[in-house]
Amino acid sequence: MAKRKNSEQNFKHSLGELIKAKDSTKKKLAHAITLNVKSHEQANYYKDKLETLSKKHEDEGQDGGSQGMNAELCQAAEPILNNIHAATAESNTSSLQSVIEHLQSAPTRLKKIILESASVACGQTLAVIKSLYPKLDLEPITSGYAEGTTDEKALELLDQVDGMAQVMAKDALYPEEEDNV
């Protein structure tokens, strides 16, 4: 009888830990979406700047001023392109056409980066949970919160696991850094 009660308590504790991990993952995803919105706003800023500079370029015609405009456009776009398209950073500003193509693909690339980052962090968290509780079935996590969990309770749970979530996210996304706290 005592073994059964202990098993039930362990199960409840494990379930609580899983809920905390899921909530943490959900909060990370919400944060990633916020970053996506900010990145999208930055991409729109650069897109607007590109349109303005392109219009100036058209207005000035094909004289020497247009080359200056191209250089100005490339210089203005360089920081965002180097961050979004890191693999091709050296070629990001080689030509006006290249800059335009990279800026047009920026929103899609940002969404992909955010999804990949969230996936890595979630995967790391679930792998740690599975390593601690190897017999635990993680499949129910994909269904969301337990039935009957209120929004208030969900927020409370998120607050409880926030510190752990930050540590897990840093460990998952930046494992090469020694101080992940």
Image (cartoon, helix red, strand yellow):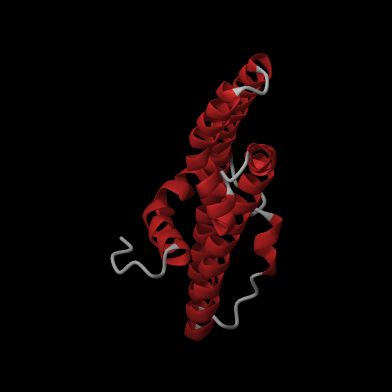
- Say which of 57 and 8 sits in front: 57
Q: Can residue 57 be seen in this snapshot?
A: yes
Query: Percent from the top left, x then y, of residue 62?
Result: 67, 23
- Say which of 53 and 5 sits in front: 53
Query: Percent from the top left, x then y, of residue 52?
Result: 61, 19
In this rendering, would 29 be left or right of 173?
right
The residue positioned 45% from the left and 45% from the top of the image is 156
Q: Can residue 148 be seen in this snapshot?
A: no
Residue 162 higher or lower than 55, as above or below? below
Residue at the far front in the pictured view: 63
Query: Percent from the top left, x then y, of residue 18?
Result: 54, 64
The residue positioned 49% from the left and 74% from the top of the image is 128
Query: Percent from the top left, x then y, of residue 13?
Result: 48, 68
- Say which of 160 and 149 sits in front: 160
Residue 102 higher or lower than 141, as above or below? above
The residue positioned 66% from the left and 43% from the top of the image is 98
